[in-house]
Amino acid sequence: MTTSEPFDSDKYKKTLQLPEEPILLRLPSPRTAESNDGEKSAGNLSDLLGQVSKNSKVEIDSLINELQQLKRKLQTDGDRIQREIEEYHALSQQVMQLTSIISDSVAQLPTAHTSVDSGRTH
């Protein structure tokens, strides 16, 4: 088409195969569309918040379970360490008593100087 040719709408209708009668579409009224969009938006927002809330609750529950497990482990380890300290203390007391007995026994032995002198005659 050049600028000198007149526009022929029939030619384009045939080319595009447009129907002769206009197509009527039923569109919702603006208020209905706003209401539906608002409801859909509110519904989507509600669903989204529900999912975020659910995910948060699951994560919090998971963290609580982990903290409870760590608390039990800490308690168990603390109890074990306390027992080991008490056992170490008892063992240390026994070692001190044994050391004292050995020290006393060694003190009662005759010294080498005494035994040498007792064997000589003057």
Image (cartoon, helix red, strand yellow):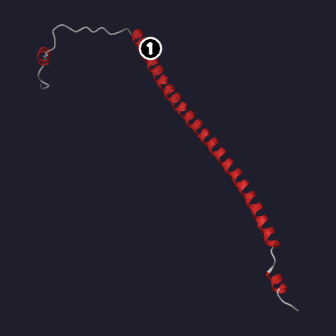
Q: Please report the residue visible at 74 percent of the width from the left and 58 percent of the height from the top.
A: 94
Badge 1 marks a residue whose secondary structure is: helix
Q: Please report the residue visible at 79 percent of the width from the left and 72 percent of the height from the top.
A: 106
Q: Please report the residue visible at 59 percent of the width from the left and 40 percent of the height from the top.
A: 70
From the top left corner, tell me how far across and down residue 76 is, in percent: 62, 42
Q: Please report the residue visible at 53 percent of the width from the left and 33 percent of the height from the top.
A: 62
- Is 12 placed left or right of 42 in the picture? left
Q: Nearer the viewer, residue 80 or 22?
A: 80
- Is 36 placed left or right of 95 in the picture? left
Residue 105 falls in which quadrant of the image?
A: bottom right
- Is 52 placed left or right of 83 in the picture? left
* Quadrant of the drawing holding the C terminus: bottom right
The outermost residue toward the bottom is 122
* Quadrant of the drawing holding the N terminus: top left
Residue 89 falls in which quadrant of the image?
A: bottom right
Q: Amino acid at mark 1?
A: Glu
- Is 14 placed left or right of 56 in the picture? left
From the top left corner, tell me how far across and down residue 30 is, in percent: 39, 11
Q: Nearer the viewer, residue 77 or 41?
A: 77
Name above or below for residue 35 compared with residue 89. above
Q: Nearer the viewer, residue 118 or 56?
A: 118
Disc 1 crowd, CA 10 A, few/some/many (<14, 14-19, 20+): few
Name above or below for residue 100 compared with residue 56. below
From the top left corner, tell me how far across and down residue 40 is, in percent: 42, 16
Name above or below for residue 93 compared with residue 49. below
Number of numbered markers: 1
Residue 38 falls in which quadrant of the image?
A: top left
Q: Which residue is mark 1?
A: 39
From the top left corner, tell me how far across and down residue 113 is, in percent: 82, 83
The outermost residue toward the right is 122
